[in-house]
């Protein structure tokens, strides 16, 4: 299995993609006392196996309820208190064992505790493996919006075990495929075509095909992060579909759509809006819609979406600039770009029309 590197000078770190992490985890770069952070879905399955693999009886588990609504300041405070109670110090290591929620929360706690301690990402969902575990974005949600509080704090390593995907619920696995599609949509038309060809193998969780897709996405993400760590330019392209998606998640109280489903809808809306503006052909938008549908993902606005609330929520997105809407649009598959001055009234009219068609 491949090993990649996120090249950030002295803060560079490896991404290892391993078939059977829990047989080889003794090589994890754990410094000093450690704490495993997980949730009540993943912890019972993998926490003890991880601790046995690293040979550390002094690495207790802190576990919280699963789900995006738990990624909040209250849980963040509880985790910090647990880290202090465990006696973690500046030479300690946090092991983030779980999906994107755990990775974001544990990474943010590591960023803030004693002004920054080490952490390792051990993602257990497809979405976390190919996106949120790489790049050092950490944070929690507020009632006003998603990921509004956080920090850039790079991990010491990212350890990906593809075998854990066997226990991932089908809905979460398909949601992760939305982010896989994103990498082809924004900058790699060849990879997008490969996904169209390999859709059946991916849905069947063929190990070799999955490993190839994960490695491709991680390699692309690592390159972007190395060139634009704090999202001053190119890294923003990775948000394709996310401004729409995050707003839909908030309006649904994080219970109607899981993240990948919301991103799938957002990507299709971004592509369709690009076509509406005359920036891209309708053929590419239809290809995107077909691939997302092939993976069992939604592409249309949820029934009875309040368009005014949706646009208002999009204005609160952290990717907005000086109160102006910023979207990632495209000129077609593999050709995404940043659009900083979106006309809110024009967007509202487009969304109202899209809503009527559902």
Image (cartoon, grey):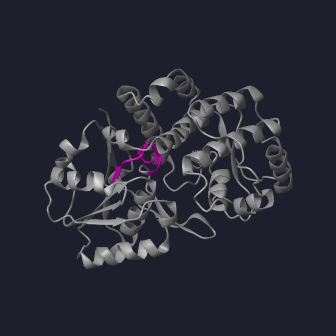
Where residue 136 sits, quadrant-wise, is: bottom left
Q: 298 or 222, which is in the foreground? A: 298
Whether 107 is drawn above or below 267: the answer is below
Judged left or right of residue 46, residue 125 is right
Q: Is residue 338 visible?
A: yes
Measuring 36% from the left and 43% from the top, which residue is drawn there? 167
Q: Is residue 122 magenta?
A: yes
Measuring 75% from the left and 54% from the top, which residue is drawn there? 305
Residue numbers of the magenta segment: 121-132
Percent position of residue 156, x then y: 31, 55
Percent position of residue 262, x then y: 61, 49
Q: Is residue 45 magenta?
A: no
Q: 188 or 231, which is in the foreground? A: 188
Where residue 112 sits, quadrant-wise, is: bottom left
Check the picture and name the quadrant holding the C terminus: top right
Whether 350 is drawn above or below 184: the answer is below
Check the picture and name the quadrant holding the N terminus: top left
């Amino acid at each position: 299995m491949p090993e990649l590197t996120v090249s950030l000078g002295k803060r560079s770190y490896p991404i290892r993609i391993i078939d059977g992490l829990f047989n080889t985890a003794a090589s994890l770069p754990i410094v000093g006392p450690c704490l495993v952070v997980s949730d009540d879905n993943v912890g019972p399955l993998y926490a003890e196996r991880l601790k046995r693999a690293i040979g550390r009886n002094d690495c207790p588990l802190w576990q919280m309820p699963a789900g995006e609504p738990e990624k909040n300041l209250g849980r963040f405070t509880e985790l910090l208190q647990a880290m202090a109670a465990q006696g973690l110090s500046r030479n300690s290591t946090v092991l983030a064992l779980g999906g994107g929620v755990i990775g974001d929360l544990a990474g943010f706690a590591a960023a803030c505790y004693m002004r920054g301690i080490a952490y390792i990402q051990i993602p257990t969902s497809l979405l976390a493996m190919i996106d949120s575990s790489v790049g050092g974005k950490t944070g929690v949600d507020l009632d006003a919006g998603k990921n509004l509080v956080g920090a850039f704090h790079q991990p010491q390593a990212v350890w990906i075990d593809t075998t854990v995907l066997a226990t991932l619920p089908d809905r979460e696995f398909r949601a992760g495929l939305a982010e896989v599609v994103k990498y082809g949509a924004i900058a790699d038309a060849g990879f997008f075509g490969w996904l169209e060809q390999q859709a059946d193998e991916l849905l069947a969780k063929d190990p070799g095909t999955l490993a190839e897709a994960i490695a491709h996405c991680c390699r692309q993400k690592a390159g972007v992060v190395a060139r634009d760590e704090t999202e001053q330019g190119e890294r923003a392209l990775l948000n394709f579909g996310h401004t729409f998606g995050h707003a839909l998640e908030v309006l649904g109280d994080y219970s109607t759509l899981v993240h990948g489903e919301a991103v799938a809808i957002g990507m299709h809306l971004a592509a369709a809006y690009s076509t509406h503006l005359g920036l891209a052909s309708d053929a590419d938008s239809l290809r995107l819609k077909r691939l997302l549908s092939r993976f069992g993902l939604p592409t249309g606005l949820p029934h009875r979406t309040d368009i005014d609330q949706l646009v208002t929520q999009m204005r609160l997105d952290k990717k907005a600039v000086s109160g102006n809407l910023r979207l990632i649009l495209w000129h077609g598959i593999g050709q995404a770009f940043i659009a900083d001055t979106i006309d809110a009234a024009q967007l509202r009219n487009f969304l109202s029309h899209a809503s009527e068609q559902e």
